[in-house]
Image: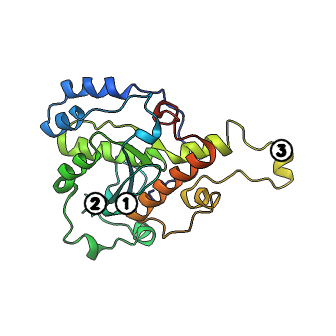
Amino acid sequence: MSLFAAGSRAAEQPVVDWKQHFAALAQQARDPRLVQFYQAGAVTADTPLQQAPLVALDVETTGLDCQRDSIVSLGLVPFNLKRIRCGEAKYWVVKPAGELSSESVTFHHITHSDIRHAPRLASVLDELLAAMAGKVMVVHYRSIERDFLNQAVQQQLGEALHFPVIDTMQLEARLHRGQQQPGWLARLLGKQTESIRLADSRLRYNLPLYQAHHALTDALATAELLQAQVATHYSAEVTLGELWN
């Protein structure tokens, strides 16, 4: 997850019929790469999670504002509830549109020398879309991955990018926050709101600590977190419609 994504969760969004939505988008898209992406289709909302093609996704960025900031790295890790396919993982460092800030370098450790000869996102877009096609993306804080990728594709192709996601941060918020924040008495007694950041969420499941703010490592960490969430709180038969956005 990007360094600037704090623990607050985004507002709940209406559940989309992604299979129907992709069929419509395949007819509307103009760029052949997006047409091919949407033609790959989406699984239905009643598909059990254990049968879904999952890919964990993480992007690191130069800031929080997708209108102003840029992606500097992306990590993808295919997996299912029993296995993480590290041998099929993908990782890219890409040259951002603007300059790196000292704050972003401090967090994700991607330096000016790292991006000097890096490709632009446009150069890896075909491979990225191919890796995402037909899959359910799994992220930790969807407002980063979805918004930044959508903005980047709009800049490159002039069209928006839509795709379903399961947000492990949102699942943690459901489990540990609900709709209520601690009342005055709880706050007086020192009760703190549960952190739903990636590292803190993983600790609740006794998952190991990894280096934070590296796109490939965070994608792996997100895949492991979903596996742990399902094993602890759900069933492998839980449907995608109960989890995705």
User: What is the secondary structure assignment of the residue under circle 1?
Assistant: loop
> At 46% from the left edge and 39% from the top edge, which residue is drawn?
49
Name the N-terminal-most of marks 2 and 1.
1
Cα distance in 3D space between marks 2 and 3: 45 Å
Determine which residue is flagged by label 2: 98
Q: Give the residue furthest to the bottom.
A: 113
**Residue that carries the numbered disc 1 in the rendered image:** 62
Q: Quadrant of the N terminus?
A: bottom left
| 185 vs 105: above or below | above
- Between label 2 and label 3, give the one nearer the viewer: 3
Number of numbered discs overlaid on the protein picture: 3
Decide: few, some or many residues near mark 2? Use Cα within 10 Å; few <14, some 14-19, many ≥20: few
Q: Secondary structure at mark 2?
A: loop
- Rendered image quadrant of residue 63: bottom left
* Residue type at numbered disc 2: Gly
State the residue position of label 3: 184
Image position of 199 (left or right of 139): right
Residue at left 48%, top 26%?
14
In the rendered image, residue 135, in percent from the top left (x then y), is placed at 33, 42
Q: Amino acid at mark 3?
A: Trp
Q: Could you tell me if the residues under marks 2 and 1 are in contact, i.e. CB atoms within 8 Å?
A: yes
Q: Give the CA distance from mark 1 to mark 3.
A: 37 Å
